[in-house]
Amino acid sequence: MMSRLVKKSPSICTDLPLDDTDICTISSSQPLVNLIKTSILNHVSRFSDCGLFAAILCLDLIEQAKQSGLGGNVSVRLNKHLLSLCTSYLQREDCGCKVKLDFCSSQNLVTLARSIISSKPACVLTEQETLHISKLAVQAFLLTVPCDNPGTVTLGRTVTVPVEGQSVLNSAVFPGLLLDITDAFCLSKPENQNSNPLRVVLFSASLAGDLSELGDGIIEVHPGVDTDSQILDQLLELGKQAVKDEVQLFACQKVIHPVLQQYLRSQGIIVIERLGITLMEPLIQLTGVQPVATLHTALPAKAYGRVRDISVRQFGSKTMLHLHPAGESAVCTMVLCHRNETMLCELKVVCQKAENVLRLSLKEPSALLGGGCTETHLAAYIRHKTLHEVPESALGCSQTEYRLGVERFCHSLESVAAALEHNGGNSLIDLTHAHHWTLPADVTRGHMEDSLGFCGCGLVGSSPSNKWTYLNTKYTEFSPATLSRDTTVQPRVLDSFTAKLNALHVAVETANLALDVRYIIQDVN
Amino acid sequence: MQPVEHLHLKHVLQTVCVLEAVVLRSFGPEGGQVLFTRDTGQAMLSRSGTRILTALRLEHPLARMVVECVRKHSTVTGDGSKTFILLLASLLRMIHTMACKEPNVYHTYNSRAAAEAATARRLADELLAFALEELDDLIAVRVVPYGLCVSWKDITAKSQSPAYTNCHYAQKLLASFFHTRLGHTHCDFISNLTCELLRHWKFKNDLPSSTLQFVNDNFPALHTPVLGFPISCSRLIEGQVIHRDFATPCPQTDCQPVKAVVFTGYLQQKLLSAGNVLKVGRGGQEMEANSKKEKSIVEFSAWSERSLECVIANLQRLGVSVLLSAVKQTAAVLSLAAQAEMCVVECISKDELSLFAHLSGTTPVSDCWMIEPVNVATLTFCRPILLGVHRYVHVAFHDLEERVKPCSLVICGPGEGQTDQHACAFQDAIRMLLTTCRPMVHQPSSRVRWSQAVLYLLVGHLSFS
């Protein structure tokens, strides 16, 4: 019956309910994979971190739900209930896996940046290089936070300049803007001995001599008339006015007529053309300039901006003009160096992600313990909290089903923590604070206590009074103890609070969505 | 001649049963989603019968006809398309069973198939007659007494007020609708959000159906999908969200009120349209003998800039600080506007501009040389808003007494499939409420319309064979 319609219609319908086999072997169920992938990518585009955490958790929740034999609807309701338990715990002041970020010292911020940068291995960075880049990321972030303006604060911008072929340790951050100057020219040394700021003018229209905004019609020129030189004369008038007004930096988003360039340079003005649209906004923010697009009116005085100084910097074969801000500015430039182009691209992306996460921390100045400790801690908390709870009638399940659902949810959380271990080692949990520990595979049971150094996040050290158990074994429920606020011991690995919380939500919601799908129709046209 | 295919009753039944199988698993409160994917990777999630069937893009003429009926029904009512298919399949099955059992004996037919078809047609005619003549009365006597009356006040009243005991039912109606469309996890939250939205848009002294109609017509401009957040982050924000970013930096002024003008055309007029000819000469003051004084090209360009400056000066005189444009303005416009401390938003869609004009009570400027006070809108604020990864423009209107408190809906979801689904569910809910609130007097009920459609379909098709 089905096949007859299939021959006639362009779509192919699979008249089978969504099987366990379809879900457990995720790779074969292509549409579902795409659905999950889209959710994760959308989360990452906003929060820049914890994408892998969300993906693993989501897939594991789906697998656990199918294996548990609980009805799809029951699993969905239980997941939602347990998610709200997690969220309310994480948002409490006394949450055991939350760390308040201290903005008076840069250590937490550097740790946060370092956790992000070291979690993306495609940049191929050594330990020293990772630390250097993390410090630069925090430095750039702090430079973009303006200090002197009262009222609403607008964050500034970090412009990234990639330089290929140099060592990563040559990367640096500069306040102000670095502009590429293509020809080694022509920079008549500006003898700016006095401390007066240099005047800047910026054009957003083309100064090449084409009057494009006149229209699309035909222009009939009277014989003997040279329109090009008429236009050029007008451009030179602009140049003369710039000279009269003592402009020292003449910049244009588009092309400047070569004769005009020559004239300006002969008058000792630094000329920059072809800035491009991306550099316009940072330049405006830095100098306070108002871009001019009219060619026939006198340059208004308030269109001028200023910079404190201009200097030349060399990075390998690249020559750059450094514009120093006059007064405090929230624009800075990060020069990133790496050995080859691919790794450089990765590094650029990673630094942008780190900046995004640091900005998010301004809204919510907390971080969660990394290294799998938050996940194991949450799992232990949930197990303990729901131990004596009776499921509400709205959940529509029995006590046994409730306990089964809780067990599966916690198991998913723990397997995310276990997924951090890539070298075939074993994952353990300690029975006091519920932090995550890893043990190399070749260590025997007797030597266990000696080999465990610190937990995943670095806060808890191994001591004789601690007891551990392997992560997949059942342990008696206990309430995980919070650590004493000992400020001398700082966590080594931190995750962004907002990113992780959102990732948790997105993972559970996407898992619930996948569990709810009853039918997949693939259009193969 | 092309071979003619004979359509037998059992083919009709087969086709409809396949459609039934597709929508069956999404039916009802325990029903699940259908995930529809294309080769492009685009995914659509739905529980809505219309959306699922329309997305199939069937080629079979009979199937297409059924889907078209479903679509037309759903455009009016917003709900009930799966029920339609299930009823249709069930009726066809019954007719088929009965027709096979007792083919008509008192006419002679060439084949059993023809006899069955004739019986089926007769049964269909009888059903149609019943539906047209007796069904309405039957419903009025036997079904309506068990129903509930839902009125507009119920939908928009706040649930805490004890005086409106009926509002419980109205919100239950919405909650059940969302339960079947979006699943049980978020249905209560979303139905509360819908009620709140309708509460804000209640036009005083106006019929409730006009509010619902207004929200339905303007829904694309009234909502913003935001990706990457959980669904529970969906909320209402006051005013209107224009889905574009500022083209010039927004001046940080706190002074109120903010004045805005809508432009549908270019501020810097193109002097030369295609097909025209501009004659340029030497220009200047000299008059040559026997030649007309022609301006130089520079003078034309200068004139164009000066006229733009006049327009901007006029706007400044009127105290305007926000320019909303339907088209992309030239660089000169942006630069002069920025120098005059005005911010510009470009390429705004027509729907959003017409909504803006309606809410602010102004008309867009058609001719830049004539900007009058009736074109100037007064806003409480106009500032950037960050929703997800996009920056948009957020405006709020100076509220005047007889106007509503406009608000805009932010629909969050992990992916585009979910936000699409929610937006469609919202719109269908509004349509469903419209049908519910419409007075029932002198109008054939939608149930009768369904049955009519069903039976016309059958009668029409059985004449093929």
Image (cartoon, rainbow, N blue to C red):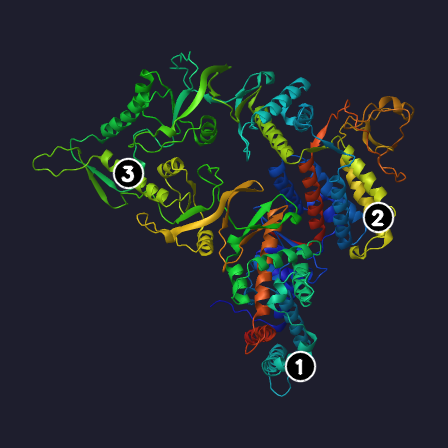
Q: Which chain contains the residue that carries disc 1?
A: B
Q: Earlier in the sequence, mark 3 or mark 1?
A: 1
Residue B306's tag is 3
Residue A204 appears at what percent x and percent y? 38, 32
Q: Which residue is mark 1?
A: B141
Question: Which of these two is toward me, A223 or A8?
Answer: A223
Residue A60's tag is none
Name which quarter of the figure residue B137 lies in: bottom right
Q: Which residue is mark 2?
A: A404
Residue B352 appears at what percent x and percent y? 47, 52
Q: Are marks 3 and 1 in contact (CB under 8 Å)?
A: no
Name which quarter of the figure residue B135 lies in: bottom right
Residue B163 against residue A123 in the figure, above or below: below
The image quadrant where one finds the N terminus of chain A is: bottom right
Residue B23 against residue A313 in the figure, above or below: below
User: Which kind of residue does numbered mark 3 sit on?
Assistant: Arg
Question: Which of these two is toward me, A19 or B191?
Answer: B191
> Which label sits in the foreground, 1 or 2?
1
Residue B65 visible, this angle = no
User: Which kind of residue does numbered mark 2 sit on?
Assistant: Leu
Mark 2 surroundings: few (<14), some (14-19) or many (≥20) residues within 10 A: some
Mark 1: which secondary structure?
A: helix
